[in-house]
């Protein structure tokens, strides 16, 4: 019985994956595979190994690695046979099994996985039987119809007794966490979006939902696409990496019209997660100037500019600005918001609240320093941390075109769609304070 299955590129980076049971943490699976397989000495490498009570079974094919993982002492023989047969099925549909063919047939590969494995158990591997559920098409998926799982069971939703709500509604939230590291001169050192589509289903019976996304989505690694960020922006494509879907998703139409069809789990669950790199411009520009007057005072001036569209507005915005550990008697001047000295964190917390895009705000702080100090000025200043939340806004440009609800009893369900962008680890480096001697 498998917990999850991964298809990795030659560097160990996931191309696609399927979490069948949700009983193991997937965060470190790729890193454990790299450490214990790819980076291991050739004479010590093993196709089967165990890390933290999770069994890893590997199968190499060309420039790909197929990886099955399961909790405890799973049946590794069955897992190895399953991975080999998976390659055979992919050959039937894709002709050649490679990183390129998997990316070109992203939705079809996931559809085949759904038919071949159900809740971690092997189901159908005969290509002739699979053709009754998935029509063969060279390189691109054009006409696939969804079929129920071979077992006839929907493990993620209760059917007996049927689920009932007096008011039928479903909430869909696109949430993006933004990670940035910006140099003191404004140069972007690293940037990343980690996004997800969060659902909260309060629907009776066994409804089928259809969620449509942008037509411009592209599922491939940005670094392998040969497209620089400016060209990407001009073409308005949205390049997503490390895309994961909930097991309820049926991807029969996704490759052609970006529609996700699924019978939802009851309550809250993550429908889809994704990652996106190479952002073009920081959401916030920060400049800082600090002065340390020896034995007298510390002064810092901060300017922050919001770079997103003017019609958008932060719900919350605050900056944590590091200061020397021995300051006292703080005083502040701001054009907007309030400041608090946080001695336990050795920083100033500047809370700006609601701020529109294309706006510059300023803050000046003056704090006393002891006449005699045993500490030496640091040659490197800690970075400024930005924390924020922007409603009705996404950096990636992902947009839900429609969300429809179909149920055999014919009730009318109400869909609610929301967007939110918030800070992950957003850091802006600053120059160390200039020392002014008396």
Image (cartoon, rainbow, N blue to C red):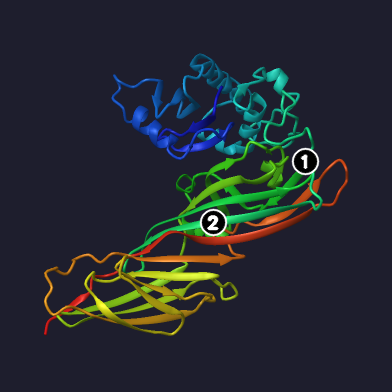
136 over 387 or under it: above or below: above
Would residue 106 appear left or right of 45 to someone viewing this image? right
| Picture quadrant where residue 251 is located | top right
Secondary structure found at label 1 = loop
127 over 234 or under it: above or below: above
Is label 2 or label 1 in front? 1
Q: Nearer the viewer, residue 405 or 64?
A: 405
Q: Position of residue 401 (x, y in %)?
A: 71, 56
Q: Among all residues in the image, which is located at the extreme top?
A: 77
* Residue at the disc numbered 1: 163
| Picture quadrant where residue 419 is located | bottom right
The crowd level at tag 2 (other Cα within 10 Å; few <14, some 14-19, many 20+) is many
Labels 2 and 1: the sequence-earlier one: 1
Position of the N terminus, as image quadrant, is top right
Q: Are marks 2 and 1 in contact (CB under 8 Å)?
A: no
Residue at (42% x, 27% y) in the render: 53
Q: Position of residue 314 (x, y in %)?
A: 54, 71
Which label was assigned to residue 176?
A: 2
Position of the C terminus, as image quadrant, is bottom left
170 over 34 or under it: above or below: below
Residue at (34% x, 32% y) in the render: 35
Q: Position of residue 423 (x, y in %)?
A: 47, 61
The crowd level at tag 1 (other Cα within 10 Å; few <14, some 14-19, many 20+) is some
């Amino acid at each position: 019985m498998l917990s999850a299955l991964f298809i990795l590129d030659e560097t160990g980076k996931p191309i696609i994956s399927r979490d069948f049971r949700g009983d193991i943490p997937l965060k470190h699976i790729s890193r454990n595979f790299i450490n214990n397989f790819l980076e291991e000495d050739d004479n010590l490498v093993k196709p089967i190994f165990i890390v933290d009570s999770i069994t890893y079974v590997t199968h190499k094919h060309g420039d790909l690695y197929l990886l099955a993982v399961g909790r405890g002492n799973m049946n590794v023989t069955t897992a190895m046979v399953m991975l080999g047969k998976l390659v055979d099925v992919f050959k039937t549909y894709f002709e050649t099994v490679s990183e390129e063919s998997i990316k070109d047939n992203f939705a079809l590969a996931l559809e085949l996985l759904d038919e071949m494995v159900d809740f971690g158990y092997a189901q159908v591997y005969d290509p002739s039987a699979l053709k009754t559920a998935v029509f063969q098409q060279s390189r691109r998926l054009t006409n696939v119809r969804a079929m129920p799982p071979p077992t006839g069971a929907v493990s993620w939703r209760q059917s007996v007794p049927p689920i009932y709500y007096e008011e039928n509604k479903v909430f869909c939230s696109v949430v993006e966490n933004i990670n940035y590291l910006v140099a003191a001169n404004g140069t972007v050192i690293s940037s990343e979006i980690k996004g997800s589509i969060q659902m909260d289903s309060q629907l009776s019976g066994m409804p089928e939902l259809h969620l449509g996304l942008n037509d411009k989505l592209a599922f491939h690694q940005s670094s392998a696409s040969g497209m620089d960020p400016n060209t990407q922006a001009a073409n308005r494509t949205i390049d997503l990496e490390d895309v994961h879907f909930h097991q309820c998703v049926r991807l029969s139409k996704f490759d052609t019209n970006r529609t996700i069809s699924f019978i939802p789990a009851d309550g809250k669950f993550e429908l889809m997660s994704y990652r996106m790199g190479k952002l073009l411009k920081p959401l916030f520009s920060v400049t800082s100037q600090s002065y340390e007057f020896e034995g007298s005072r510390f002064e810092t001036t901060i300017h922050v500019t919001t770079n997103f569209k003017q019609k958008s507005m932060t719900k919350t915005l605050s900056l944590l600005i590091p200061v020397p550990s021995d300051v006292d008697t703080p005083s502040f001047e701001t054009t907007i918001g309030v400041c608090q000295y946080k001695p336990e964190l050795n920083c100033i917390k500047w809370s700006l609240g609601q701020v529109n895009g294309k706006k510059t705000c300023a803050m000046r702080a003056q704090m006393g320093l002891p006449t005699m100090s045993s500490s030496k000025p640091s040659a490197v200043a800690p970075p400024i941390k930005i924390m924020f939340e922007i409603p009705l806004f996404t950096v990636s440009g992902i947009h839900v075109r429609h969300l429809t609800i179909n149920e055999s009893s014919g009730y009318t369900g109400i869909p609610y769609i929301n967007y939110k962008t918030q800070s992950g680890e957003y850091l802006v480096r600053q120059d160390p304070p200039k020392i002014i001697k008396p």
